[in-house]
Amino acid sequence: MACPYFFPTRKSNGLYWPFPQRLPLGAGFEGSCAAGTESVPSAEELRDFCNVGYAGRCSRLPSDRRGDVIRFSVAAEQDGLVTLRYVCERDHAPVEHGELHYELSSRRFRSAPADAILLRQAECYVEVYMERRAIGG
């Protein structure tokens, strides 16, 4: 359930979460905020808002917005293809949903979404999923 304005750039080793594997993208990430003018959030904003969504107290979050969070889950992994489902929510209700298909051989989505943030968050989610799968976690 990461913030729909959060563009993750790399995994964070400097921010502390008691259980980072439980975070919406599977790990904590650093990145930028695309709400309004793009900027780099503080460590506190990354920890408390960007990585966890439903950030009503975040001063950057616009009142007129498409959603509050983006959720991801792996629906299936079969024949070299990971099927990822996503849901964008507003006030805890779905406003958009879909499936993305990630090809393991090419390490790319078959049909990338037009939304760069949705795509990047999906890439991060799959990256962490594949790391865990490789180590049996």
Image (spheres, grey):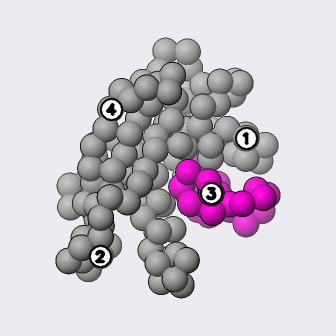
* Location of residue 77 by image quarter: bottom left
Nearest the camera: 93 or 48?
Answer: 93
- From what the image shows, is residue 36 above or below residue 48? above
The residue carrying mark 2 is: 104
Disc 2 residue crowd, few under 14, some 14–19, many 20+, Cα 10 Å: some
Q: Residue at x 76, y 56 (%)?
A: 17
The residue carrying mark 3 is: 22
Q: Which residues are magenta?
A: 9-32
Q: Is residue 72 magenta?
A: no
Residue 116 visible in rendering: no
Q: Earlier in the sequence, mark 3 or mark 2?
A: 3
Q: Earlier in the sequence, mark 4 or mark 3?
A: 3
* Location of residue 102 by image quarter: bottom left
Disc 4 residue crowd, few under 14, some 14–19, many 20+, Cα 10 Å: few
Q: Earlier in the sequence, mark 2 or mark 1?
A: 1
Residue type pointed to by label 2: Leu
Q: Is residue 12 magenta?
A: yes
Q: CA distance from mark 3 to mark 2?
A: 24 Å
The residue carrying mark 1 is: 48
Q: Secondary structure at mark 3?
A: helix
Nearer the camera: disc 3 or disc 1: 3
Q: CA distance from mark 3 to mark 1?
A: 14 Å
User: Is mark 3 in CB contact (under 8 Å) with mark 1?
Assistant: no
- From what the image shows, is residue 99 above or below residue 5? below
- From what the image shows, is residue 128 above or below residue 118? below
Quadrant of the image containing the C terminus: bottom right
Q: CA distance from mark 2 to mark 1?
A: 32 Å
